[in-house]
Image (cartoon, grey):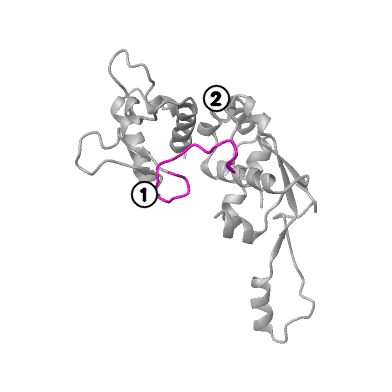
């Protein structure tokens, strides 16, 4: 995810300035002396001093992105098949990535998300939940947004386990959590049927089928990305090391 998000940022910087997007100008781990662009491993904050190890990690990430249809690599066995990767659309249609126009519906990440290092510090599940909440805010104007189980999983593909990342997001100050029913352990309440089922086995099945309503609402704070990600997260984890939450 950090590599894909960084590649998207590069696409916006290049194509937004009417430049040709060419990932071949950027090496995976190291380039020749005097190369004018930093390699991908540097953009991803890889501190390893061994060039081979840095390259392996970048190629592993590209291989995973190819598996999900987010990049296109050269044919196996060809030279520089990873260096010449092609960024594909996040829609998963196999087309080349295109920067959305000014009037196109798009979810906007503030530049400081990258410039302050949040894409390198947050876990993928935390990024996914923040993006989900931000997208919900873009669709509704009410103060604070929440998502039912059906919306989280059916529309966004966010499982209940992934959804718990909202605790960390709130701890890091990236979202504000509004608890509509304090002292609830899992932040949800079950709808009660108007008439109880006739049989015990039906009652058991009905309990599984009842929709679960969110009792948490969230307000995202994009301006919080202005803070240095490493300092914020390090301070939070030092003050309250994992495991931090009982759910």
Q: Quadrant of residue 224?
A: top right
Q: Nearer the viewer, residue 74 or 178?
A: 74
* The disc label shown at residue 115, or none: 2
Q: Which tag, 1 or 2, sits closer to the chain's start?
A: 1
Residue that numbered label 1 is attached to: 67
Residue 47 at x, y = what percent? 41, 24
Which one is in front, 131 or 51? Answer: 131
Compared with 193, 117 (above or below) is above
Residue at x 72% of width, y 54% of height: 187
Q: Nearer the viewer, residue 189 or 240?
A: 189
Residue 46 % position (x, y):
41, 27
Give the side of residue 131 with respect to residue 63, left or right: right
Residue found 43% across the figure and 35% down from its top: 3
Element type where label 2 sits in the image: helix
Could you tell whether 124 is left or right of 231 in the image?
left
Which region is colored magenta?
89-106
């Amino acid at each position: 995810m950090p590599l894909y998000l960084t590649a998207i940022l590069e696409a916006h910087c290049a194509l937004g300035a009417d430049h040709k997007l060419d990932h071949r100008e950027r090496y995976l781990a190291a380039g020749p002396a005097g190369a004018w662009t930093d390699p991908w491993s540097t953009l991803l904050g890889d501190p390893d001093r061994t060039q081979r190890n840095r390259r392996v990690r970048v190629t592993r990430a590209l291989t995973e992105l190819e598996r999900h249809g987010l990049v296109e690599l050269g044919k196996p066995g060809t030279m520089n098949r990873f260096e010449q990767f092609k960024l594909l659309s996040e829609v998963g249609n196999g087309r080349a990535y295109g920067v959305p126009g000014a009037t196109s519906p798009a979810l906007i990440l503030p530049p400081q998300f990258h410039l302050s290092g949040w894409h390198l510090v947050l876990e993928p599940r935390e990024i996914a939940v923040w993006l989900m909440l931000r997208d919900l805010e873009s669709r509704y104007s009410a103060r604070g947004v929440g998502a039912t189980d059906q919306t989280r999983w059916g529309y966004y593909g966010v499982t209940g386990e992934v959804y718990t990342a909202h605790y960390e997001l709130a701890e890091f100050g990236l979202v504000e959590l509004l608890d509509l029913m304090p002292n609830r352990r899992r932040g949800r309440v079950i709808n009660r049927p108007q008439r109880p089922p006739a049989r015990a086995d039906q009652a058991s099945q009905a309990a599984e089928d009842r929709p679960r309503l969110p009792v948490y609402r969230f307000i995202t704070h994009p301006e919080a990305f202005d803070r240095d990600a490493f300092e914020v997260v390090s301070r939070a984890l030092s003050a309250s090391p994992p495991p931090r939450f009982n759910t």
